[in-house]
Amino acid sequence: MARTVRSLLVAALLALALKGAALAQEGTDTPVCAKSDFETVVDQTAAALRDLTGQNKPAFQEKLRLLKEKRGWSQEQFMKEAAPFVRDDQIAVYDQDSERLLDDISSLGQEGAEAKSPDCELLKELRAQMDQLVAAQNAKWGYMFKKLDEALGQ
């Protein structure tokens, strides 16, 4: 999922940035948005998602290994018993939220690419969607760790 989220995110936002969606309205007080502003949002969000995965995945895998040892599971049992720690109804909700946010981000990219003179409101909305995406992924990791910590405590 993380690879898919990252790939879709980068593709959608690079399309937005590369098509020059950031145009300013000359002669007004409208803030000027540049292509680099959109690229910065893409880079920051991609980095935040990479950092989340980089920080959480190894620790999560280590805790799964500890649970396997604690419970004395064979490798086959482990594959079956560990599944609920990475797939359940709540995790599916987090994944659906992330997919919805990616669709929204993609739509913003399309809107920005097709607009004749978009203003910086598009950039603000894009930042908000990106922040929500990072928050959803962070909440998902938190939820999965909580489940695993509870199992280790039993």
Image (cartoon, rainbow, N blue to C red):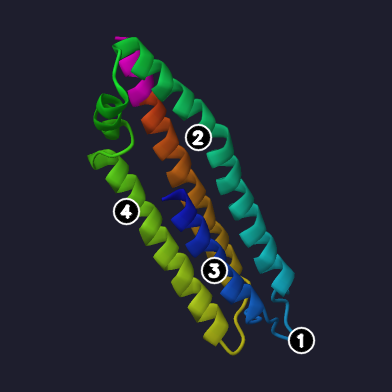
Horizontal and vertical percent position of residue 29 = 73, 77
Q: Label 2 belongs to which residue?
A: 57
Q: CA distance from mark 1 to mark 3?
A: 33 Å
Q: Residue at x 40, y 54 (%)?
A: 98
Q: Quadrant of residue 115?
A: bottom right
Q: Is residue 62 visible?
A: yes
Q: Is the C-beta separation of discs 4 and 1 under 8 Å?
A: no
Please identify the quadrant where the C terminus is shown. top left
Q: CA distance from mark 4 to mark 3?
A: 19 Å
Of marks 4 and 1, which one's residue comes earlier in the chain? 1
Q: Residues within 10 Å of mark 1 (few under 14, many from 20)?
A: few
Residue type, numbered disc 1: Gly
Comparing marks 4 and 3, which lies closer to the viewer? 3
Comparing marks 2 and 3, which lies closer to the viewer? 2
Of marks 1 and 3, which one's residue comes earlier in the chain? 3
Q: Residue at x 62, y 86 (%)?
A: 117
Q: Main secondary structure of the magenta part?
A: helix
Q: Label 3 belongs to which residue?
A: 11
Element type where label 1 sits in the image: loop
Q: CA distance from mark 2 to mark 3?
A: 23 Å
Q: Residues within 10 Å of mark 3 (few under 14, many from 20)?
A: some
Element type where label 2 sits in the image: helix
From the viewer's perspective, tell me whether residue 68 is left or right of residue 45. Answer: left
Of marks 2 and 3, which one's residue comes earlier in the chain? 3
Task: Say if 87 sits above or below 150 in the image.
Answer: below
Front residue of 120 and 148: 148
Element type where label 4 sits in the image: helix
Horizontal and vertical percent position of residue 40 = 69, 61
Comparing marks 1 and 3, which lies closer to the viewer? 3
